[in-house]
Amino acid sequence: LEKTYIMVKPDGVERGLVGEIIKRFENKGYQLVAIQQFETNKDILNQHYEDLKEKPFFPKLLNYMLSGPVVGMVWQGKDVVKTGRKLLGETDPLKSAPGTIRGDFCIDVGHNICHGSDSVKSAEREICLWFPNGIVTWERKCMHDLIYE
Ligand code: GTP
Ligand code: MG
């Protein structure tokens, strides 16, 4: 089954929204297969956001992501990368529909509470970066048959 890397950013952690974000993915039917709170540092953030290094907002983004701990999670299920991004909403919370995580809980692009991998390839790279010792996955037998046809 496909996996994605979802990360509650420092504002989301401090605002107590970790449970709310977990609930949205759980309610959808996805399976949580790894979760850990991390202290961030420049080195890992430079790797995580390597495609954004040249953007004018990158220093601001670094400061934001260094402002407190994050909670990294790996979620598993059919089409979870693309559908996970739909659950998050748009990058800009003001353009995110109500009902999405960013549409419901935040306002500014620089404080948009949660990250989601943008492709299966990015997800694999990000999961290896944040969980370098690997993760243990298993199949929820009864649940699988209730959720998938
Ligand atoms: P992530 O799931 O966090 O990767 O967001 P995204 O994929 O929707 O957007 P992108 O990867 O392009 O940007 C990563 C993050 O940088 C965003 O989630 C924002 O927190 C931040 N960001 C993007 N654009 C801007 C901007 O124009 N200004 C500021 N301040 N931050 C930005
Ligand atoms: Mg991104």
Image (tube, grey):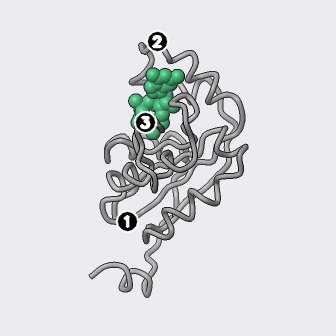
Residue under the point 40% across and 40% down: 90
Residue with the mark numbered 3: 91
Indicate which disc residue 77 carries.
1
Tell me which residue sits at (50%, 51%) in the image.
101
Residue underneath mark 2: 56
Residues packed near mark 2 inside 10 Å, few (<14), some (14 to 19) or many (20 plus): few
Of mark 3 and mark 1, the one earlier in the sequence is 1
Determine the image quadrant of residue 14. top right
Cα–Cα gap, marks 2 and 3: 16 Å
Q: Residue furthest left?
A: 149
Q: Position of residue 140 (x, y in %)?
A: 46, 79
Left or right placement of residue 103 versus residue 147 in this view:
right
Instruction: Tell me which residue sits at (67%, 42%) in the image.
Output: 38
Q: Is residue 47 visible?
A: no
Q: Amino acid at mark 1?
A: Gly
> Closer to the camera: disc 3 or disc 1?
3
- Give, as a three-letter code, the residue at label 2: Pro
- Left-right relation of 71 to 33: right
Q: Residues within 10 Å of mark 1 (few under 14, many from 20)?
A: many
Which comes sooner in the sequence, label 2 or label 3? 2
* Mark 3 lies within 8 Å of ligand 1 (Cβ measured): yes
- Find out if the beta carbon at label 2 lies less than 8 Å from the nearest ligand 1 atom: yes
